[in-house]
Amino acid sequence: MAVTCATCGFTYVPELAEDRAQHRHAHFQVIRAISPKPTKRFLHAIRNGLDGEHVGYKAARWKNEEMYARARMFRREFQYDFSAWDSTGNDLAAHGFLFNDDTGIFGHGSIAGACAIRWTEFSDAPAQWAMIWAWIAPAARRKGILSRRWPLLKQWFGEFHLSRPLSGAMTGFVNKQRVLPGLSNVKSGY
């Protein structure tokens, strides 16, 4: 009889060795994202500050894999059909940011979340940068991780669009940012 893991959401038949192995892999991927641990390579990348969190065109494979892992978590949580990050790093129009845990929850050098911004063509508006997703591990949410990176994102991308639909948490975040001088990026109607 098939069971669904309450932690990772994977449905498998425990009596089948191949299903158990697939479940272990899926479970590990979810746990790694929601309870990250510091890694040497991320610590090395961020030694120069927030620029080390950037994942651009042809970034190191591990950075793209970490972005893809968070994109999968975003997809899973919001029940989208696909992950909005190319794990190969070949998307010239996309920029990602891996968020170092600066809250102390997981430890410096842990990837507490990520976001992706890409150049987007709209049918009813001029092309512009758009944040297409942002995901933060549940234990680190509402701790200021995205707020502390907002000025850097504004510096790099100027006024950018937020792709919809927005979660309740992101709507609250945006409304909070709108009242802070110099941080509002949401245009009327977004």
Image: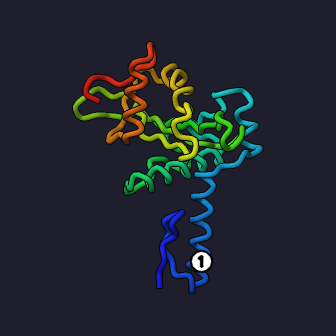
Q: Tell me the crowding category of disc 1: few under 14, some 14 to 19, or many 20 or more residues within 10 angstroms, Cα based.
A: some
Q: Position of residue 33 (x, y in %)?
A: 59, 52
Q: Residue at x 68, y 37 (%)?
A: 104
Which image quadrant for residue 182?
A: top left
- Label 1's element? helix
Name the kind of residue labelled 1 in the image: Arg
Q: Is residue 39 left or right of residue 12?
A: right
Q: Is residue 36 left or right of residue 77?
A: right
Q: Residue at x 60, y 59 (%)?
A: 29
Q: Residue at x 63, y 44 (%)?
A: 63
Nearest the viewer among 102 and 56 is: 102
The mark total stands at 1
Which image quadrant for residue 41?
A: top right
Residue lying at the far left of the rendered structure: 124
User: How is colour applied across the structure in the image?
Assistant: rainbow
Q: Position of residue 131 (x, y in %)?
A: 42, 34
Nearest the viewer among 35 and 157 is: 35
Nearest the viewer among 169 and 120 is: 169
Q: Which residue is mark 1?
A: 20
Q: Position of residue 84 (x, y in %)?
A: 44, 47
Q: Name above or below for residue 181 compared with residue 118.
A: above
Q: Is residue 45 left or right of residue 127?
A: right
Q: Name above or below for residue 183 compared with residue 32.
A: above
Q: Quadrant of the C terminus?
A: top left
Q: Position of residue 20 (x, y in %)?
A: 59, 77
Q: Is residue 10 left or right of residue 62?
A: left
Q: Residue at x 65, y 38 (%)?
A: 101
